[in-house]
Image: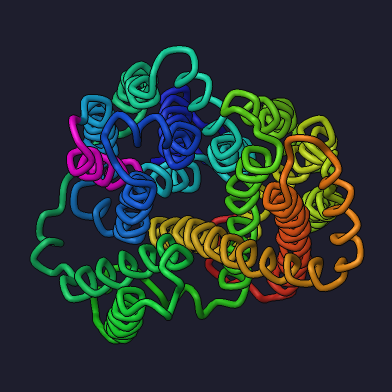
Amino acid sequence: MVNRHQASRQTWLAVIGGALAAFMAILDIQITNASLQNIQGALSASPEEITWISTAYLVAEVVIIPMTGWLCRVFSIRKYMLTSVALFIVFSVLCGFSWNLPSMILFRGLQGLFGGALIPLAYTLVMSLLPEQERPKGLALFSLSAVCSPAFGPTLGGWLTDTWSWHMIFFINLIPGILMLILLNKGLPKEKTNFSELKRGDWLGIATMAVGLACLQIVLEEGNLNDWFGSSYIVSLSVISVLALMIFVARELTTINPLVNLRLLARPRFSFGVLANMGVGFCLYSAVYLLPLYLGSIHDYTPTDIGLVIMWMGVPQLFIVPLVPKLIDKFGCISLTMMGIVLFAAGFYLSTNLNPNFAGPQFHFVQILRAIGLPLIMTPLMLITMKGLSQSDMADASSLFNAFRNLGGAIGMAVMATVLTNRTSFHDQRLREALPQTMDSIYRAYSQVPHINHQEVVALFSMEIHKQAAIMAYADDFLLMTWVMLICSLFIWLADRSKTDSTTVF
């Protein structure tokens, strides 16, 4: 029974352990990005094959998150979470010992399967164990996992790889993993298992959801590399995904014991909050994807240099997040969330001023704006979205809330990659059409320089045009993210105006 006035020390041990578990699970989404070239060389993989290291983790994660609520009912939160943490550690270590690409993909997928469960489980602990007045503190702690992990992932991965080797990005999970087990073992209350739920399990829902979401994730990850619907591979996966998800939705809305309570999305407050969270995930993961790509391809930054730039978003949040509960008391959830969106969107808008001299130092102020804005969004948004839900709905609501944020991130990275490719081609063509006279004069000028022939001049100038076009395309991506954040503000306003149910946990 939860003390409605003040949470016990034991409860806070469980909440802290859960937040650390979610932090590590989200951290591992991004931690390999800065080390892919090193892993590629060690495992003798092609550039196309090595992307499956990230894809395998994301596919497993997006499949397991919606199943978390049901698995908690079967095994209990305590047993399921302790088992997930233990196996997350085991498969993290096995990733570091991978001897070829297939073994790495297998272990990485299993790591994501058990790591992905830790994200909604940590959120469920906050909402189910803490009394109402202490939930803002718990959610602020949980939000560290969502807002800081994407920023620290590439930084930590690059530093570990440059300092030791890529194996360390997996072995590093061992020490915090043991700490998680200790905290959760001491803090989580003992509960009975309910294996009868397995007999009544929605196995058709599990199968169609797993197939549908897995295919969708692969489409989003691989689509841009395979020319989207110009590829029969992508078309086939898309058709399978749509059909499987249609069956899944129909099944969940008609069965007595659904895998996920999709009826929660019929509640306007919850559905608008989920859409806003999806938009935040779209922009958060897109920014973490774009910034290293821009600094590496345009300015030749090393993984460590890129990590130092990204740190300007990660470190300030460590000081801002603890202040959020008091700011909520003073300004309220809606005002604080809107303030955060303005700052977060401003960071994207200022990034549209890209030019050949706009590099790491110029991103410092932009990163600080985002660092201030994001924590002001996440914790109040969770409180707004979950208002009016009963305790029995918390596990399913947490699964949906976190699944849609991750899905928004996957969609965001796919959209950013596609827009970047298409807009680079567009700007490249427009620049070449607009500069025929300039190109001729530069050709003639360079032709007078000794040891440079006409072909070299053409190649050098063509590369410069393409670089300028790419910079303009990156600016277009940041502008798109600005608009997405402004749309999120509309969803939050609509969520606030929506009625809540009479049965509430607030």
Pick the front one: 232 or 437: 437
In the depicted structure, whether residue 465 falls above or below residue 131: below
Picture coordinates of residue 457, whole percent (x, y): 74, 49
Kindly identify the residue that appears in the image at 34 percent across and 26 percent down: 170
Picture coordinates of residue 79, whole percent (x, y): 22, 38
With 380 as the anchor, is 36 left or right in this view? left
Pick the front one: 166 or 227: 227
Q: How many marks?
A: 0
In the depicted structure, whether residue 139 falls above or below residue 270: above
Residue 135: name its quadrant.
Answer: top right
Picture coordinates of residue 68, whole percent (x, y): 31, 54
Residue 111 belongs to the span the image colors magenta? yes
With 15 as the anchor, is 112 left or right in this view? left
For the N terminus, give its image quadrant: top left
- The residue most toward the top is 163
Pick the front one: 101 or 156: 101
Kindly identify the residue that appears in the image at 27 percent across and 47 percent down: 113
Residue 462: name its quadrant.
Answer: bottom right
Residue 378 belongs to the span the image colors magenta? no
Pick the front one: 282 or 310: 310
With 495 as the anchor, is 87 left or right in this view? left
Magenta stretch prevailing secondary structure: helix
In the depicted structure, whether residue 9 falls above or below residue 474: above
Picture coordinates of residue 370, whole percent (x, y): 76, 43
User: For the magenta stretch, what is the residue range?
Assistant: 99-115
